[in-house]
Image: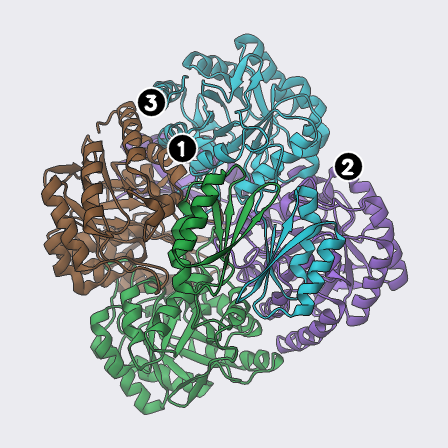
Chain colours: A green, B brown, C purple, D cyan
Amino acid sequence: MIIVLKPGATEKQVHHVLEKVKEFGFQTDVNRGAERTVIGIKGKIDQVARLRLQPIEGFPGVEKIVTVSAPYKLVSRQYKSQDTVIDVEGVEIGGKNVVIMAGPCSVESREMVLEIAKKVKHAGAKILRGGAFKPRTSPYSFQGLGEEGLQYLKEAREKTGLPVITELMDIRQLPLLEKYADIIQIGARNMQNFDLLKEVGRSKKPVLLKRGMGSTIEELLMSAEYIVSEGNSRVILCERGIRTFENATRFTLDINAIPVIKQLSHLPIVADPSHSTGQRSLVAAIAKAALAAGADGLMIEVHPNPEIAKSDGPQSLLPNMFSDLMEGLKKVSHAVGRDL
Amino acid sequence: MIIVLKPGATEKQVHHVLEKVKEFGFQTDVNRGAERTVIGIKGKIDQVARLRLQPIEGFPGVEKIVTVSAPYKLVSRQYKSQDTVIDVEGVEIGGKNVVIMAGPCSVESREMVLEIAKKVKHAGAKILRGGAFKPRTSPYSFQGLGEEGLQYLKEAREKTGLPVITELMDIRQLPLLEKYADIIQIGARNMQNFDLLKEVGRSKKPVLLKRGMGSTIEELLMSAEYIVSEGNSRVILCERGIRTFENATRFTLDINAIPVIKQLSHLPIVADPSHSTGQRSLVAAIAKAALAAGADGLMIEVHPNPEIAKSDGPQSLLPNMFSDLMEGLKKVSHAVGRDL
Amino acid sequence: MIIVLKPGATEKQVHHVLEKVKEFGFQTDVNRGAERTVIGIKGKIDQVARLRLQPIEGFPGVEKIVTVSAPYKLVSRQYKSQDTVIDVEGVEIGGKNVVIMAGPCSVESREMVLEIAKKVKHAGAKILRGGAFKPRTSPYSFQGLGEEGLQYLKEAREKTGLPVITELMDIRQLPLLEKYADIIQIGARNMQNFDLLKEVGRSKKPVLLKRGMGSTIEELLMSAEYIVSEGNSRVILCERGIRTFENATRFTLDINAIPVIKQLSHLPIVADPSHSTGQRSLVAAIAKAALAAGADGLMIEVHPNPEIAKSDGPQSLLPNMFSDLMEGLKKVSHAVGRDL
Amino acid sequence: MIIVLKPGATEKQVHHVLEKVKEFGFQTDVNRGAERTVIGIKGKIDQVARLRLQPIEGFPGVEKIVTVSAPYKLVSRQYKSQDTVIDVEGVEIGGKNVVIMAGPCSVESREMVLEIAKKVKHAGAKILRGGAFKPRTSPYSFQGLGEEGLQYLKEAREKTGLPVITELMDIRQLPLLEKYADIIQIGARNMQNFDLLKEVGRSKKPVLLKRGMGSTIEELLMSAEYIVSEGNSRVILCERGIRTFENATRFTLDINAIPVIKQLSHLPIVADPSHSTGQRSLVAAIAKAALAAGADGLMIEVHPNPEIAKSDGPQSLLPNMFSDLMEGLKKVSHAVGRDL
């Protein structure tokens, strides 16, 4: 941690900063340059220490504080150099095999979810996705079937053997989700719902954490740190597109985030080409790109009849499009030394 | 609502769309141009209708659906042309007077909150702000004093008469907040925590809803619609800065949003110059700009000793800076025909 | 083209709009809905027509104008459904083979460019890149060797047979560039330097047009339209990263743009993983992702000794890293049905 | 300047960095922390020095280089603490009076420009704006009247006494612009057209430099540095809106930029509420906000009949709206201690 003073900082201001730092229990190393003074903080600066020192940024004479270590710890590659591999009922996420999670945006009926589950399994998907509680921008939109939807998912799991991932929106529904889901999904809009993160951090279920559309990579890792620091280390990260000025697509998939996260963290990272494009005709290209960039898996929306989908119809693949895509994904996986 | 077909759409595809629209119960008006066909949907298209028609965007031959009405209703200026004025224990928000809400970022101690409360009241603030539950990016940061903090706020209210605004993060704390707060704040990170919105929509307390850092104006209004559609029409909107590529400041205050929201909605809109800049030295200029643009009020962080602030020290004003600023704000208010 | 009127538009306002549209020579189709009136413009609406109608957006009673056709024409997929393949001295860009353009960011010396040219050719690159005129944010940065640099590039071409791409910044240097370059590059910062676009539109040389860091896909296509409408149809588009709030990388490669542009235009599109990441360690992952998404080629920076590079050292690959990457790119190309 | 090494940097890597830095002629100060080593560069680090050290960012073992001084010099507040006041034919920009520049987006005819010139002068504008060469996204749009337009502007100046500002797009037109214009405008799309910047840097005319829609504040100041470093110190900066994800308005005025630039630079800064909103009904609110935030002036589009404007009709004010706005702007100016 380095404290950079303003060019015109007075001797008194420098002294004041030095005193406070010592008062907080740290040693300093002062470097008086021709133009400005820089104060280095010695000793091991952990998260807690950093936060105690933060207010110094507001001291008179201080220009900025430069932090040289990342603010997250348990999720960092430094803390654990080996890739974390998460076992979900026998399916390994983060290992050599890339894992495809597929299914409808929302569970709309028993028949529909059973039909899709069979089809995506046949095509090679390893996890069934489907929403029972749906975060919708409009209060007038279909909000999901609730527990009824969870029961259909459970039935689909029994019939196909596919583990199930579904979204948790409300902290009060956690016991219900723990009963039905194999992976608990935290949606982009709840990425910084910190109380929810703490609760799933105390759960025994693996958690898939989606990046917020206005959140940085560092914030995503900090939210993962919330979960892991409560004891649940089985966190899967998900890049699902960020908000940018480009409006030809619904969001902009931050493809750079995939290799960046692989460098910074040991946690698995998957991508969601359906939400990050918003258009069926773009899903295949972006799905392949994400695997080529090193993603450990994908979440893809499939619907038997997107024309009547109750949510996200325009981006859902038809089952036969999904099967074709899986062939292409196998080839790309092999090209980058992975299996599918 | 208008359905625009692709240039090469076949007669069969047009027919298919027309049939579906009729099946959903709507009348159509077909306009076959030289280049492409456009289908107008006749009749009153309310929110529910729009949502039923949405999947058509995924139909073969369809290029896009153009919605000509806003997706929100109860919060719209069309629904209610007169400005909504919200009475909070005698303080009117949205009326002729602009309302300044001031106080510490977080409640750190009894003495501190009592001291600031007196000082901001003396300077002309009408509402006391202060966080007891704090949404922090890092799990290792100070998370707020909890109920203890609420009690100090209550005491400060009793001593100064200032109504209190404080943030609700966890749905389970709503009863507690209702007991202590005069206005419930929903933070930027929870703007699309829809279950939380529904719950405060059933509360009797006024709600201040902050815009998410990655959320559009339309999404902010849709989130307000969640609250109002549950029965609570006392919603105050708050522009607090959005995420952009500019990193000289922590966020970019979307000043355009203030007059835009005034046109689209009847709800009051306030601005937060502290969070949207992140720097003490910028707060005064942005506070004045927001009032000049038509904001109904401001939220400003004040701290007696920002050097030891447990959160957001660098952007907090000292009490004397706040008093000076209030003088400037009075002048700007008068210049735009308001009082302070 | 559709004119959407405001809900409260008066009969007089509607009449006024209708009259103007007729005055401009167009026929109309009025659709009076329960909530609002929508006016469709009949007949073939070409670019010129659209622009004449544009001011109507400012008429009293008008809410917005919805354009249903793209504003570009010659570069659109509708105008020419087949992919454009550009022959550059025997190297085809936009065909079955993906084309790798590689070389130093800037030409720094004769020896250096000759050495890199040999090495990238040996590794499989088909075009040599290198800047002689450099757009630098700082006036104090190395600005390129100018004509001397062009001569070294020419010598490298003679020795290796690799066609050369280099950047044009100043309209007055076009004759010089035409003498030395096989492809003229227009940099991101000049994407909307319209006079420069018109001049290269009159050149006989192929043009590589980079997307501006703050420009939309539609604007990129409009800038290409400037070149093509002047007579030069040999335009290669290049996605090189856009500005977003994410600051873990220098720019955010808009991977979605690749399949989007493939749908909208017949022109070839290449990607620049070096500038869009700004970090050597991310280049390989993003290069592979771009090819998997359908890019027709890549521009990659290679430097024999990035430690002493006069520009963009941190993102340049060492020659042996580039050779390794080429092996990986071959595999990904085959996986998506292309050759390299 | 500080070089931060990676946690696992080897002694050999540290040594290698130290050697290179010394080779470049700088002294170092090594701070070996518990977690990582930080190397401070001693002595006066000017722009040239910084650039020579930059490649070190790519050295093995190096994590990042932290620059503690700004990369611009002549335009910085540090270099010159007093505000620069620019005299344009007797009109002072950057002094106590705020200066309103008004006129049509483009010069469309002699009559039109004479009429507007008289009206905006009467309302209190001090500079006449109008484009003769227009940067248009589409090659099919009206491109301006060229020299004919400049002659009309000259005539308007003679008749009203208002100095004229008009845009330079093409480096070859500089002699023409110098003949007719009192202030040369560099548009947002040419903010990083560095050859153009150098040329106007050698001109005797004041330059108004607009911020690019995808450019940071630092880049704007670097582009100003290009002009000033060539000898022309009469540069006026202009905030005209940046690209963000919000699409309710054409651009997002970065209101924070106004006080930020006032802190960083001694150059005057004006705002353009017309382009940054794109909507007539928002111009007044944003114009007032910009003055309240400390802008030294405004550029506002006025058109006698926006319905037939050849460019930017929807955002142009009618002359009477402009007169009304001037009354409001006077009040806001006084409220912040300025005159108009």
Is disc 2 in contact with disc 3, using a CB cutoff of under 8 Å?
Answer: no
Residue A212 horizontal/vertical position (percent): 39, 62
Relative to A58, is A39 on the left or the right? right
Residue bearing the label numbered 3: D335
Is C129 above or below relative to D46?
below
- As shown in the figure, which amino acid type bears the numbered disc 1? Gly
Residue bearing the label numbered 1: C58
Which of the two discs, 1 and 2, labels the residue nearer the N terminus? 1
Mark 2 residue crowding within 10 angstroms, few (<14) / some (14–19) / many (20+): some
The residue sitting at 48% across, 69% down in the picture is A283
Is B153 above or below relative to A258?
above
Query: In the structure shown, which secondary structural element does the residue marked by tag 2 occupy?
Result: helix
Q: Nearer the viewer, mark 2 or mark 3?
A: 3
Is circle 2 on the same chain as circle 3? Answer: no
Residue C94 in view, yes or no: no
Residue D254 horizontal/vertical position (percent): 44, 39
Q: Nearer the viewer, residue A103 or A64?
A: A64
- As shown in the figure, which amino acid type bears the numbered disc 3? Ala
Q: Nearer the viewer, residue C104 or B131?
A: B131
Residue bearing the label numbered 2: C172
